[in-house]
């Protein structure tokens, strides 16, 4: 038979483990929810000519031309939902420092869904993407 002090110590350890397990189980649903997280990313040229950002509250996508280099800025988000991948793309082609261009339509993304935000520069509407960069966020 275990010594009374040792037995009491084992009982306290069992109570502590049971309590910890209860706290962990009780916390699991809250931990499973992914908080909303905005994302912002700059093009990879040495003086970033473009910026894209995604605001998780309300799901807003913006492209921002920051440099008078004759190139447009393109921002795109991609996410997976309902068994398929979805994308939304916006171009800021009105010149540098004239503000940002927002994707015009409502974007509906389920809360907690990861989105990948990409931004790049390109020459014209169908130009080759240059200085592409990406970052993730959550709706």
Image (cartoon, rainbow, N blue to C red):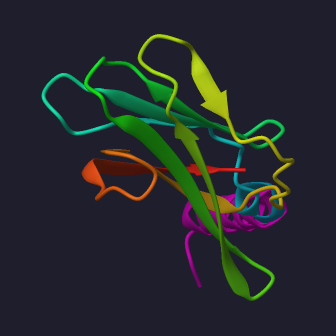
- The N terminus lies in quadrant: bottom right
Residue drawn at (81%, 82%) of the image: 82
Asked if residue 21 is among those painted magenta in the image, a careful observer would answer yes
The relative height of residue 86 versus residue 139 in the rendered view (above or below) is below
Asked if residue 9 is among those painted magenta in the image, a careful observer would answer yes
Residue drawn at (71%, 62%) of the image: 113
Picture coordinates of residue 65, whole percent (x, y): 43, 25
Secondary structure that dominates the magenta span: helix
101 relative to 104 in the view: left or right: left
8 relative to 94 in the view: left or right: right
Picture coordinates of residue 78, whole percent (x, y): 58, 64
Picture coordinates of residue 111, whole percent (x, y): 81, 55
Report the span colored magenta: 1-27
How many numbered markers are drawn? 0
Residue drawn at (68%, 69%) of the image: 14
Of the pair 73 and 119, the residue shown nearer to us: 73
29 relative to 87 in the view: left or right: right
Picture coordinates of residue 117, whole percent (x, y): 50, 51
Give the residue furthest to the left.
46
Of the pair 32 and 118, the residue shown nearer to us: 118
Give the residue furthest to the top.
97
């Amino acid at each position: 038979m275990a010594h009374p002090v040792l037995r009491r110590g084992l009982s306290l350890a069992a109570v502590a483990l049971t309590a910890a397990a209860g706290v962990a189980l009780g916390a699991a649903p809250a931990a499973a929810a992914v908080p909303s997280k905005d994302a912002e990313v700059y093009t990879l040229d040495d003086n970033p000519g473009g910026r894209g950002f995604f605001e998780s509250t309300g799901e807003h996508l913006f492209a921002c031309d920051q440099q008078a280099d004759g190139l447009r800025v393109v921002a795109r988000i991609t996410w997976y939902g309902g068994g398929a991948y979805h994308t939304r793309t916006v171009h800021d082609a009105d010149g540098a420092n004239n503000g940002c261009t927002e994707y015009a339509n409502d974007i509906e993304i389920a809360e907690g869904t990861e989105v990948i935000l990409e931004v790049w520069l390109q020459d014209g509407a169908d130009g080759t993407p240059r200085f592409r960069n990406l970052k993730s966020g959550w709706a």
